Image (cartoon, rainbow, N blue to C red):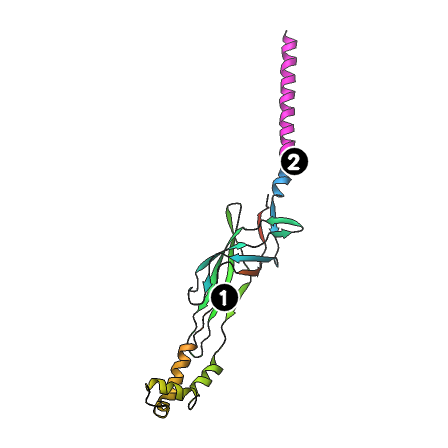
Amino acid sequence: MFEVACKNRSESAAQAAGGDNQAQAQNAAQAPQAADQTVTIPEGTKLDVRLLDPIGSASDTSGETFRATLDGPIVVNGVVAVQKDANLSGKVLVARSSGHLQTPAELVVTLTSLEVGGKTYPILTSERSWRGHSHKKRNAELIGGGAGVGALIGALVGRGKGAAIGAGVGAGGGTATAYATGKKDISIPAETPLRFVLRRPVTVPQAG
Protein backbone atom coordinates (compact mmCIF):
# COMPACT_ATOMS: atom_id res chain seq x y z
CA MET A 1 0.00 0.00 0.00
CA PHE A 2 2.80 2.39 0.88
CA GLU A 3 4.50 1.72 -2.43
CA VAL A 4 1.23 2.30 -4.33
CA ALA A 5 0.60 5.59 -2.50
CA CYS A 6 4.13 6.77 -3.24
CA LYS A 7 3.69 5.82 -6.89
CA ASN A 8 0.39 7.75 -7.12
CA ARG A 9 1.95 10.85 -5.55
CA SER A 10 4.87 10.65 -7.98
CA GLU A 11 2.51 10.36 -10.95
CA SER A 12 0.45 13.32 -9.68
CA ALA A 13 3.56 15.43 -9.27
CA ALA A 14 4.73 14.50 -12.76
CA GLN A 15 1.34 15.39 -14.23
CA ALA A 16 1.34 18.73 -12.38
CA ALA A 17 4.83 19.48 -13.64
CA GLY A 18 3.78 18.49 -17.12
CA GLY A 19 0.77 20.78 -16.92
CA ASP A 20 2.92 23.67 -15.78
CA ASN A 21 5.34 23.08 -18.63
CA GLN A 22 2.48 22.98 -21.12
CA ALA A 23 1.03 26.22 -19.77
CA GLN A 24 4.44 27.89 -20.01
CA ALA A 25 4.82 26.67 -23.56
CA GLN A 26 1.39 28.07 -24.46
CA ASN A 27 2.23 31.41 -22.88
CA ALA A 28 5.51 31.53 -24.76
CA ALA A 29 3.70 30.80 -28.00
CA GLN A 30 1.13 33.50 -27.32
CA ALA A 31 3.70 36.21 -26.46
CA PRO A 32 4.77 36.85 -30.06
CA GLN A 33 1.10 36.96 -31.09
CA ALA A 34 0.40 39.68 -28.52
CA ALA A 35 3.34 41.68 -29.86
CA ASP A 36 2.03 41.24 -33.40
CA GLN A 37 -1.28 42.86 -32.45
CA THR A 38 0.25 46.33 -32.71
CA VAL A 39 1.38 48.02 -35.90
CA THR A 40 3.60 51.03 -36.51
CA ILE A 41 2.31 53.46 -39.10
CA PRO A 42 5.43 54.94 -40.71
CA GLU A 43 6.30 58.56 -41.33
CA GLY A 44 5.13 59.71 -44.74
CA THR A 45 1.85 57.78 -44.63
CA LYS A 46 -0.99 59.71 -46.30
CA LEU A 47 -4.09 60.27 -44.18
CA ASP A 48 -7.21 60.95 -46.21
CA VAL A 49 -9.84 62.43 -43.93
CA ARG A 50 -13.26 64.05 -44.12
CA LEU A 51 -14.20 66.97 -41.89
CA LEU A 52 -16.94 66.46 -39.32
CA ASP A 53 -16.86 70.12 -38.26
CA PRO A 54 -16.74 73.19 -40.50
CA ILE A 55 -13.70 75.42 -40.11
CA GLY A 56 -13.12 78.99 -41.21
CA SER A 57 -10.89 82.02 -40.91
CA ALA A 58 -13.71 84.08 -39.38
CA SER A 59 -15.61 81.41 -37.46
CA ASP A 60 -12.58 79.91 -35.67
CA THR A 61 -9.66 81.20 -33.63
CA SER A 62 -6.12 79.92 -33.32
CA GLY A 63 -5.94 76.99 -30.89
CA GLU A 64 -9.48 75.72 -31.46
CA THR A 65 -10.01 72.03 -32.21
CA PHE A 66 -12.08 70.28 -34.86
CA ARG A 67 -13.16 66.70 -35.61
CA ALA A 68 -12.56 64.56 -38.66
CA THR A 69 -12.88 60.93 -39.71
CA LEU A 70 -10.74 58.66 -41.89
CA ASP A 71 -12.07 58.70 -45.44
CA GLY A 72 -10.26 55.43 -46.18
CA PRO A 73 -8.35 52.76 -44.21
CA ILE A 74 -4.69 53.14 -43.30
CA VAL A 75 -2.81 50.25 -44.91
CA VAL A 76 0.70 49.21 -43.85
CA ASN A 77 2.54 46.53 -45.84
CA GLY A 78 -0.70 45.42 -47.45
CA VAL A 79 -2.48 45.00 -44.11
CA VAL A 80 -5.22 47.28 -42.78
CA ALA A 81 -3.75 49.02 -39.73
CA VAL A 82 -6.68 51.36 -39.01
CA GLN A 83 -10.19 50.98 -40.34
CA LYS A 84 -12.04 53.62 -42.34
CA ASP A 85 -14.21 56.01 -40.27
CA ALA A 86 -11.76 56.08 -37.34
CA ASN A 87 -12.05 59.38 -35.48
CA LEU A 88 -9.37 62.05 -35.52
CA SER A 89 -8.94 65.44 -33.89
CA GLY A 90 -7.24 68.48 -35.33
CA LYS A 91 -6.16 71.94 -34.28
CA VAL A 92 -6.49 75.34 -35.90
CA LEU A 93 -2.97 76.78 -35.92
CA VAL A 94 -3.82 80.07 -37.59
CA ALA A 95 -7.23 81.67 -38.16
CA ARG A 96 -7.05 85.24 -39.41
CA SER A 97 -10.20 86.91 -40.58
CA SER A 98 -10.01 88.94 -43.77
CA GLY A 99 -9.20 92.57 -43.18
CA HIS A 100 -10.32 95.37 -45.44
CA LEU A 101 -8.38 96.68 -48.42
CA GLN A 102 -5.16 94.69 -48.07
CA THR A 103 -5.19 92.01 -45.32
CA PRO A 104 -6.15 88.61 -46.82
CA ALA A 105 -7.75 85.87 -44.75
CA GLU A 106 -5.56 82.95 -43.65
CA LEU A 107 -6.35 79.51 -42.24
CA VAL A 108 -3.84 76.81 -41.21
CA VAL A 109 -4.81 73.46 -39.63
CA THR A 110 -3.20 70.16 -38.67
CA LEU A 111 -4.22 66.80 -37.18
CA THR A 112 -3.27 66.06 -33.57
CA SER A 113 -4.73 62.67 -32.56
CA LEU A 114 -6.11 59.38 -33.88
CA GLU A 115 -8.61 57.16 -32.06
CA VAL A 116 -8.10 53.40 -32.35
CA GLY A 117 -9.78 50.72 -30.24
CA GLY A 118 -11.32 53.29 -27.92
CA LYS A 119 -7.94 54.90 -27.13
CA THR A 120 -6.51 58.16 -28.38
CA TYR A 121 -2.99 58.34 -29.83
CA PRO A 122 -1.22 61.68 -30.43
CA ILE A 123 0.00 62.17 -33.99
CA LEU A 124 2.08 64.76 -35.83
CA THR A 125 1.06 65.56 -39.40
CA SER A 126 1.63 68.07 -42.16
CA GLU A 127 -0.39 71.28 -42.23
CA ARG A 128 -3.12 72.36 -44.62
CA SER A 129 -3.24 76.07 -45.30
CA TRP A 130 -5.41 78.48 -47.24
CA ARG A 131 -4.80 82.15 -47.93
CA GLY A 132 -7.22 84.61 -49.41
CA HIS A 133 -6.38 86.65 -52.50
CA SER A 134 -5.27 90.22 -52.17
CA HIS A 135 -7.75 92.73 -53.54
CA LYS A 136 -5.24 95.54 -53.99
CA LYS A 137 -5.70 95.73 -57.77
CA ARG A 138 -9.49 95.68 -57.55
CA ASN A 139 -9.41 98.20 -54.73
CA ALA A 140 -7.16 100.47 -56.79
CA GLU A 141 -9.68 100.38 -59.65
CA LEU A 142 -12.52 101.26 -57.30
CA ILE A 143 -10.65 103.97 -55.43
CA GLY A 144 -9.17 105.46 -58.60
CA GLY A 145 -12.43 105.35 -60.54
CA GLY A 146 -12.95 109.09 -60.06
CA ALA A 147 -14.96 110.22 -63.04
CA GLY A 148 -16.25 106.69 -63.63
CA VAL A 149 -17.12 104.65 -60.57
CA GLY A 150 -16.47 107.58 -58.27
CA ALA A 151 -18.86 109.83 -60.15
CA LEU A 152 -21.57 107.19 -60.19
CA ILE A 153 -21.24 106.63 -56.46
CA GLY A 154 -21.16 110.37 -55.99
CA ALA A 155 -24.43 110.72 -57.86
CA LEU A 156 -26.04 108.08 -55.71
CA VAL A 157 -24.74 109.66 -52.54
CA GLY A 158 -25.94 113.06 -53.84
CA ARG A 159 -29.48 111.62 -54.10
CA GLY A 160 -30.31 112.96 -57.57
CA LYS A 161 -28.35 116.21 -57.35
CA GLY A 162 -26.20 115.16 -60.27
CA ALA A 163 -23.01 113.37 -61.05
CA ALA A 164 -21.06 116.62 -61.22
CA ILE A 165 -21.95 117.37 -57.62
CA GLY A 166 -21.58 113.78 -56.57
CA ALA A 167 -18.16 113.50 -58.23
CA GLY A 168 -16.81 115.64 -55.46
CA VAL A 169 -17.19 112.68 -53.12
CA GLY A 170 -16.21 110.20 -55.80
CA ALA A 171 -12.80 109.35 -54.39
CA GLY A 172 -14.18 108.94 -50.91
CA GLY A 173 -17.08 106.91 -52.22
CA GLY A 174 -14.71 104.66 -54.14
CA THR A 175 -12.70 104.00 -51.01
CA ALA A 176 -15.83 103.12 -49.11
CA THR A 177 -16.86 100.69 -51.83
CA ALA A 178 -13.47 98.97 -51.76
CA TYR A 179 -13.66 98.80 -48.02
CA ALA A 180 -17.06 97.10 -48.19
CA THR A 181 -16.19 94.58 -50.91
CA GLY A 182 -12.61 93.72 -49.98
CA LYS A 183 -13.46 91.40 -47.09
CA LYS A 184 -13.46 87.73 -48.16
CA ASP A 185 -13.04 85.03 -45.54
CA ILE A 186 -12.15 81.35 -45.95
CA SER A 187 -14.81 78.79 -45.10
CA ILE A 188 -14.27 75.01 -45.31
CA PRO A 189 -17.58 73.15 -44.78
CA ALA A 190 -18.13 69.84 -43.01
CA GLU A 191 -17.73 66.75 -45.23
CA THR A 192 -14.83 68.37 -47.11
CA PRO A 193 -12.14 65.76 -47.94
CA LEU A 194 -8.59 66.73 -46.94
CA ARG A 195 -5.24 64.95 -47.11
CA PHE A 196 -2.51 65.12 -44.47
CA VAL A 197 0.87 63.36 -44.26
CA LEU A 198 2.14 61.69 -41.09
CA ARG A 199 5.35 63.40 -39.94
CA ARG A 200 6.23 60.98 -37.14
CA PRO A 201 5.60 57.21 -36.82
CA VAL A 202 2.83 56.11 -34.47
CA THR A 203 2.21 52.63 -33.04
CA VAL A 204 -1.42 51.58 -32.60
CA PRO A 205 -3.36 48.32 -32.10
CA GLN A 206 -3.84 46.59 -35.43
CA ALA A 207 -7.36 46.59 -36.82
CA GLY A 208 -9.23 43.35 -36.12
As drawn, 191 above or below 103: above
Q: Which amino acid does label 1 sit on?
A: Val
Residue 12 magenta-highlighted: yes
Figure quadrant of the C terminus? top right
Expressed as whole percent of the image width and height from the top left, the position of residue 111 reads: 52, 58
As drawn, 129 above or below 12: below
Magenta extent:
1-29
Q: Which of marks 1 and 2 is in front?
A: 1
Image point 64% across, 13% down: which residue? 6
In depth, the one of 36 and 186 nearer the eye is 186
Dot 2, how many residues are within 10 Å of its Cα: few (below 14), some (14-19), or many (20+)? few
As drawn, 63 above or below 77: below
As drawn, 123 above or below 118: below
Expressed as whole percent of the image width and height from the top left, the position of residue 123 reads: 53, 55
Image point 42% across, 81% down: which residue? 178
Q: In which quarter of the image is residue 19?
A: top right
Query: Could you tell me what secondary structure mostly forms the magenta stretch?
Result: helix
Image point 40% across, 87% down: which residue? 152
Q: Which of marks 1 and 2 is nearer the N terminus?
A: 2
Figure quadrant of the N terminus? top right
Residue wearing tag 2: 29
Residue at the limit of the structure toward the right, as seen here: 78
The circle drawn on residue 23 is none
In space, the residues marked 1 and 2 are separated at their CA atoms by: 48 Å
Dot 1 falls on a residue whose secondary structure is strand
Q: Which amino acid does label 2 sit on?
A: Ala
Residue at the limit of the structure toward the front, as seen here: 160
Dot 1, how many residues are within 10 Å of its Cα: few (below 14), some (14-19), or many (20+)? some
Residue wearing tag 1: 108
In depth, the one of 187 and 148 nearer the eye is 148
Dot 2 falls on a residue whose secondary structure is helix
Expressed as whole percent of the image width and height from the top left, the position of residue 117 reads: 53, 45
